Amino acid sequence: MKLIDYLNTHFLTRGQLLARCGIDDVHLGELQERGMMPRPAYRLRVELSCDSFFGPHGEQHVIDWYPQGAPAWAGLLAALDGPREAYAIFASRYRRRLARLGDDGLPAAADQLNGDAHIASEWRHFLDGTYGLCTRAGLPEEIAAKEAAIVLIRELTALGAQQGLDEEQRRQLAAAVDLLDRVSAPFAPHEVARSSRRRCVDEVRAAWLR
């Protein structure tokens, strides 16, 4: 039941999402098919069996789970004409968050994160539900912060393994790890060991920032 507890704590069911957005199931499906709304971060296939005075009974259910930021994203789609406009908003918000990395004490994002091809790839992962799983709210700002933090963490730990880190580099590494900690999901119990949180937050803090 740990997985169920995790999902209940950190995610919204499809029904909860629809209620918060004020839309119906058909409209949500249309937005997803058009490439404007992300698909669920998790999908549970549940088989129930029950025994009672009336005899055995079985049911099968599919339960979709969405990140906490999904209602906010769905809310802005009503004013848009189609997926091109939705992507433009995603890209603008992504780039704007990269430009504000200095607010977190980090250097500007690498060119590779600002490129059209990279952001188009991020958009596809966003629509697939990948970032709904691994960020707290599943919104463009968190996705950009997560990717920028991971790039910097990898660069600094690779550099440190070769020649060590000076005081400023250690400060940047700590800032990147803290940022990643803030925007990353806790991850489901069965995923933690393989997660970016384990590799880039827990292990980096233990090895580099003690």
Image (cartoon, rainbow, N blue to C red):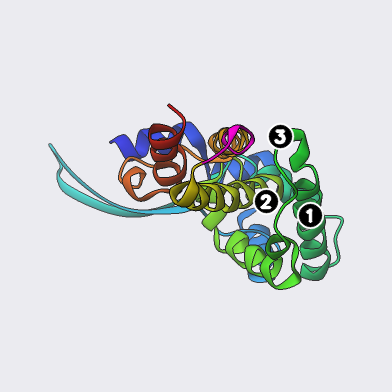
Residue name at image x 77 percent, y 39 percent:
102
Q: Is residue 65 visible?
A: no
Image coords of residue 122 (percent x, y): 64, 63
Between residue 10 and residue 161, name the one nearer to us.
161
Q: Amino acid at mark 2?
A: Ala
Per the rendered image, the range of residues in magenta is: 165-170
SS state under label 1: helix
Q: Is the magenta region chiefly helix, strand or loop?
A: helix
In three-dimensional space, the C-alpha distance between marks 3 and 1, rounded to whole angstroms, equals: 15 Å
Is the C-beta separation of discs 1 and 2 under 8 Å? Answer: yes
Q: CA distance from mark 1 to mark 2?
A: 7 Å
Q: Does residue 93 appear in this view?
A: yes
Q: Nearer the viewer, mark 3 or mark 2?
A: 3
Instruction: Give the mark nearer the N terminus: 1 vs 2.
Output: 1
- Say which of 98 and 123 sits in front: 98
Residue type beneath disc 1: Arg
Residue at which label 3 appears: 104
Q: Are marks 3 and 1 in contact (CB under 8 Å)?
A: no
Disc 1 target residue: 95
Judged left or right of residue 117, residue 8 is left
Quadrant housing the N terminus: top left
Which one is earlier in the sequence, the residue at label 3 or at label 1?
A: 1
**Which residue is painted at 61% across and 52% down in the image?**
147
User: What residue would you read off at disc 2?
Assistant: 144
> Along the horizontal axis of the image, is 26 left or right of 184?
right
Q: Secondary structure at mark 2?
A: helix
Kindly state the secondary structure of the residue where label 3 is placed: helix
